[in-house]
Every structure is written in C-alpha cells, then in structure tokens.
C-alpha cells in the first residue's frame, strides 16, 4: 500500500494563500522518496517554515503517522490567512500540528533550538525587486528579492540553530538561486547535501536539496579555519556538477497561483 499524502480536493484555499503547485508537489515527492530513511531516523519533532495551504505539513504527517505516531509537528507562516487555511487542511485529513504566525521561526528559536529533527521549507525563491520581499498576502509566498535569495539567506542560519544534531533540512531551490552556492554556505556550517528530487517544467528548474550535519565536514571546516584554508576546489566542483546550467523563471502569472 502506497504511503498517504494530502488529497488536493481536501486542501483548503483562500485568494491570498499560495495553492499547491509544482514546487509543493516536488517537495512532497522528495519526502516520499526519503520516507524510509526518515522513518528509520525516528524524528520526534518536525517543522515546516512557510506552510501556505498546509499541503506539505499534512502530507508529512500522513506519510509518517502510522509508523511514527508520537511525532510533534509545527508549522509557521507570516500570512495569517495561510494559518487558517492550513488548519482547515489538517482537520480535513485528521492530522494535527501546532501553527504559529511569525516571520520564518522568529518566536521559536529559543523554544526549539537544537530540537528539530526534520525541517521542510518551500521558501519565497522567485527573483523580484527587494521592496516586494515580505509583502502582505500571497506575494509573501514567492517574492525572493535579488536572485530569489533574500529570504533563503535568512532561513539558513535559523535552520542551523533549530536543527538537532541529527536534524535534516529539505529545501526547495530554483536554478536562479545558485543552489551550489547555497550548498557551499551550508558546508561551511558543517552540512553535507544532496539533491533528492530535480524537476524541470516549462517555467523553472527545481531542486529539492537535503542538508544534514556531517562530522567529517565539521572537522574539515574547523581545520580550514585554523589553517586559514578555503574549502577544497574539488568540493565546490562536486557541488556545481549536481546542478544543470538552466535558468527558468516562474513569474507571478503562473497557473498555479
């Protein structure tokens, strides 16, 4: 029997809330692809930053529910309409999560520091003028500033503080976001990474990247700081080789919005 995910017909909606689209489906597919590993990992606390319609957090709770009934689920969003829609989506699927209205995880960094075992993020990644970042309503779901990195670059240090020693981060990125450079930034914090799902559409090339703490990388990073060495060139070459040199654009006129 295939693992359950949220049913689109049961996902609630609102004009100011981002509906499930290609990036949402790719993120859930990545979680499904890694589901056996997640179950073996036995997470106790899962967090979604930017829950939108609730499709992803509901799917995660459903696919882990039977095997891991004691998991705690949290979800945040800066858009209050999204939290109401997410609650309706969770209720329709008979699963639960603690929902909080906040920017990224600003109210959770002390409460959940070092405790999050699985963190999932579909960030605002579309390149836009910087003044659009943090806009009210649905625009907050996609406006990513220059190169689509304004919010992503704020999320990475938050993830580093929240993730447990065994914590895993799953993040949606666009080719324009320079995902290899994102991986390099996380490598400097001691994280390994790999692409779980790669998907190209007519408008964009998506990569769902998984990050996890790696003791060997952490040791290398400490040695590099001590000896004033940079990350080896071959490490960067390895990261770059994972990403095709494509540059698709998802505008705000997408049929999924």
Image (tube, rainbow, N blue to C red):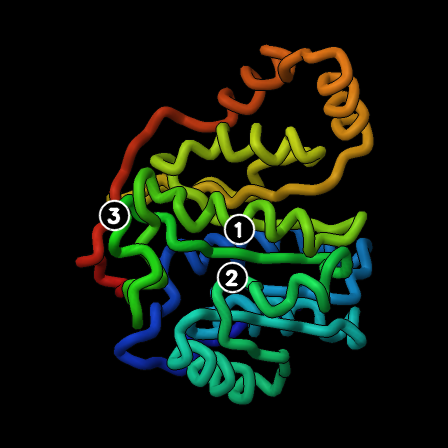
Quadrant housing the C terminus: bottom left
Q: Secondary structure at mark 1?
A: helix
- Please report the residue visible at 39 percent of the width from the left and 46 percent of the height from the top: 150
- CB of mark 3 within 8 Å of CB of mark 2? no
Distance between the Cα atoms at labels 3 and 2? 19 Å
Pointer 1 residue? 155
Q: Position of residue 40 (x, y in %)?
A: 81, 55
Q: Position of residue 24 (x, y in %)?
A: 44, 59
Mark 2 neighbour density, 10 Å: few (under 14) some (14–19) many (20 or more): many
- Please report the residue visible at 80 percent of the width from the left and 75 percent of the height from the top: 70
- CB of mark 1 within 8 Å of CB of mark 3? no
Pointer 2 residue? 104
Residue 59, quarter of the rendered image: bottom right
Distance between the Cα atoms at labels 2 and 1? 7 Å
Residue in front for this viewpoint, 24 or 100? 100
Mark 1 neighbour density, 10 Å: few (under 14) some (14–19) many (20 or more): some
How many badges with numbers are in the image? 3
First along the sequence among labels 1 and 3: 3
Give the farthest residue toward the left: 253
Residue in front for this viewpoint, 234 or 91? 234
Residue 72, quarter of the rendered image: bottom right
- CB of mark 2 within 8 Å of CB of mark 1? yes
Residue in front for this viewpoint, 33 or 97? 97
Q: Secondary structure at mark 2?
A: loop
- Please report the residue visible at 31 percent of the width from the left and 40 percent of the height from the top: 146
Mark 3 neighbour density, 10 Å: few (under 14) some (14–19) many (20 or more): many
First along the sequence among labels 2 and 1: 2
Q: Position of residue 253 (x, y in %)?
A: 18, 58
- Please report the residue visible at 52 percent of the width from the left and 66 percent of the height from the top: 56
Left or right relative to 197: residue 12:
left
Pointer 3 residue? 128
């Amino acid at each position: 029997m295939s693992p359950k995910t949220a049913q689109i017909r049961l996902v609630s909606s609102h004009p100011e809330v981002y509906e499930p689209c290609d990036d949402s489906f790719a993120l859930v597919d990545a979680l499904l692809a890694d589901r056996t590993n997640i179950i073996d990992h036995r997470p106790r606390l899962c967090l979604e930053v930017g829950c939108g319609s609730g499709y992803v957090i509901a799917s995660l709770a459903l696919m882990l529910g039977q095997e891991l009934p004691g998991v705690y689920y949290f979800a945040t969003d800066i858009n209050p309409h999204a939290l109401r829609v997410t609650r309706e989506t969770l209720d329709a699927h008979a699963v639960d999560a603690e929902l909080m209205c906040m920017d990224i995880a600003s109210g959770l960094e002390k409460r959940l520091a070092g405790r999050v075992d699985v963190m999932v993020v579909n960030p605002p990644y579309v390149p836009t003028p910087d003044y659009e970042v943090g806009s009210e309503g649905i625009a907050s779901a996609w406006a990513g500033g220059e190169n689509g990195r304004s919010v992503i670059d704020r999320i990475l240090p938050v993830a580093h503080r929240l993730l447990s020693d065994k914590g895993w981060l799953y993040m949606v990125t666009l080719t324009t976001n320079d995902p290899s450079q994102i991986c390099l930034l996380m490598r400097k914090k001691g994280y390994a990474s790999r692409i779980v799902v790669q998907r190209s559409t007519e408008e964009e090339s998506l990569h769902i990247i998984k990050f996890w703490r790696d003791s060997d990388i952490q040791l290398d990073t400490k040695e590099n700081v001590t000896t004033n060495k940079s990350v080896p060139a071959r490490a960067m070459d390895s990261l770059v080789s994972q990403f095709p040199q494509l540059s698709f654009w998802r505008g705000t006129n997408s049929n999924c919005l």
